[in-house]
Image (cartoon, grey):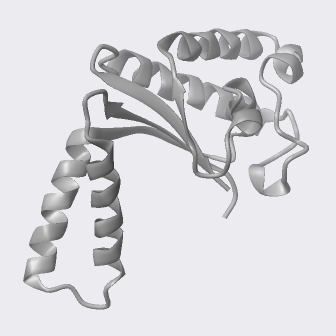
Amino acid sequence: MGLIIFFETRKKNADMVRFENARKELRKLYKKDEMTEEDDMRADSLEEFINSVYTTYSVFSKYSFLMNFFGFADNCENGEYMEIAKCQIEDFIDAAKEVLANHDLAPTKLPLCTEMSPCWGSAEYDDYYFGDIEFAMEQLDIACHSVDWDNEILYMSANW
């Protein structure tokens, strides 16, 4: 499977117990071999509620430098969520700009997680790495300006 990283928001006032129960129920519905019309209507209702609570802004595959930069690799387990502040996104964007301007800064500013697993992506600071930095910077800049920071919380999660 490899490393998949998500950045998503959740409403600050959301009933997270109801949200998690809705996600579990929806997964059960989708695992059925055949869904009835009633199941389809229930799934639509659950999806509507889930989408009112959270928004996925970005999904990254094998961008291990994000794990290091945000401290996820050291502080979180597979599948956990970590709150990300606006200033952290801004700091990442600044670091990305520095690395793109001077590639020699990559191992110190945005290091890869080379010790974790080959499933986490390349261990090389090559053209693909710098392209990934640019893409992540663009996507997180969009998220930074799209999140309603007064009413939403930005989370990072990862699965590997």
Q: Nearer the viewer, residue 128 or 33?
A: 33
Give residue 68's quadrant in the image. Answer: top right
Give residue 40's quadrant in the image. Answer: bottom left
Residue visible at 68% across and 47% down in the picture: 77
Q: Is residue 157 above or below residue 1?
A: above
Quadrant housing the C terminus: bottom right
Count of numbered marks: 0
Residue visible at 35% across and 65% down in the picture: 24
Residue 27: percent from left, percent from top: 35, 70
The answer to whether residue 67 is left or right of residue 59 is: right
Give residue 125's quadrant in the image. Answer: top right
Q: Nearer the viewer, residue 91 or 73?
A: 73
The answer to whether residue 151 is left or right of residue 43 is: right
The answer to whether residue 112 is left or right of residue 60 is: right
Q: Nearer the viewer, residue 85 or 144?
A: 85
Residue visible at 25% across and 29% down in the picture: 13
Residue 1: percent from left, percent from top: 66, 64
Residue 150: percent from left, percent from top: 30, 13
Residue 29: percent from left, percent from top: 28, 76
Residue placed furthest toward the front: 17
Q: Is residue 52 above or below residue 131?
A: below
Residue visible at 25% across and 90% down in the picture: 34
The answer to whether residue 156 is left or right of residue 1 is: left
Q: Nearer the viewer, residue 36 or 58?
A: 36
Q: Is residue 145 above or below residue 31?
A: above
